[in-house]
Image (cartoon, rainbow, N blue to C red):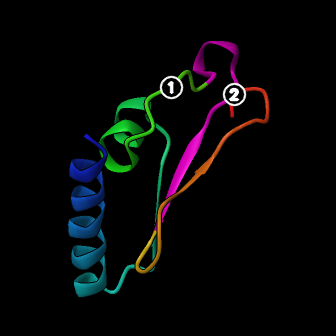
Amino acid sequence: MLDEAKQRCITLQNRKQELGISHAVFTSESSIAYLAGFWGYLGFEFGRPSMLVVRTEGDPIVITPLMES
């Protein structure tokens, strides 16, 4: 599963580079799971959203409150 998520992220990064987009931010739990392979409890029920930042290069970054990490 994690390998599939890594490949999806690489595909997104390549497409973003073609379009000249440096960063993309995702806030939906399903998008975070799909692109980063991070599918744990993300705190949406309590109004503490998590985000995924996908840069053109490098690993995706999950930003989440400490309690959810």
* Residue drawn at point x = 35 percent, y = 31 percent: 30
Corner quadrant of residue 69? top right
Looking at the rendered structure, the secondary structure element under dot 1 is loop
Q: Is residue 23 above or below residue 62?
A: below
Q: Is residue 19 above or below residue 54?
A: below
CA distance separating discs 2 and 1? 8 Å
In the rendered image, which quarter contains the N terminus? top left
* Residue drawn at point x = 30 percent, y = 61 percent: 9
Disc 1 marks a residue whose amino acid type is Gly
Looking at the rendered structure, the secondary structure element under dot 2 is loop
Corner quadrant of residue 49? top right
Q: Which residue is mark 1?
A: 40
* Residue drawn at point x = 43 percent, y = 30 percent: 39
**Whole-percent x and y of residue 59?**
47, 67
Q: Are marks 2 and 1 in contact (CB under 8 Å)?
A: yes
Q: Is residue 62 left or right of residue 64?
A: left
The one nearer the camera, 62 or 47, is 62
**Crowding near pointer 1: few (<14 within 10 Å), some, many (20+)?**
few
**Whole-percent x and y of residue 28?**
44, 35
Which contiguous range is marked in magenta?
A: 43-54
Q: Is residue 53 magenta?
A: yes
Q: Residue furthest right?
A: 66
The one nearer the camera, 28 or 7, is 7
Disc 2 marks a residue whose amino acid type is Glu
**Whole-percent x and y of residue 51?**
57, 45
User: Of label 2 and label 1, which has the lower sequence position?
Assistant: 1
**Crowding near pointer 2: few (<14 within 10 Å), some, many (20+)?**
some
Q: Is residue 49 magenta?
A: yes
**Whole-percent x and y of residue 40?**
50, 25
Q: Is residue 47 above or below residue 38?
A: above
Q: Which disc, if any, is residue 24?
A: none
Q: Which residue is mark 2?
A: 68
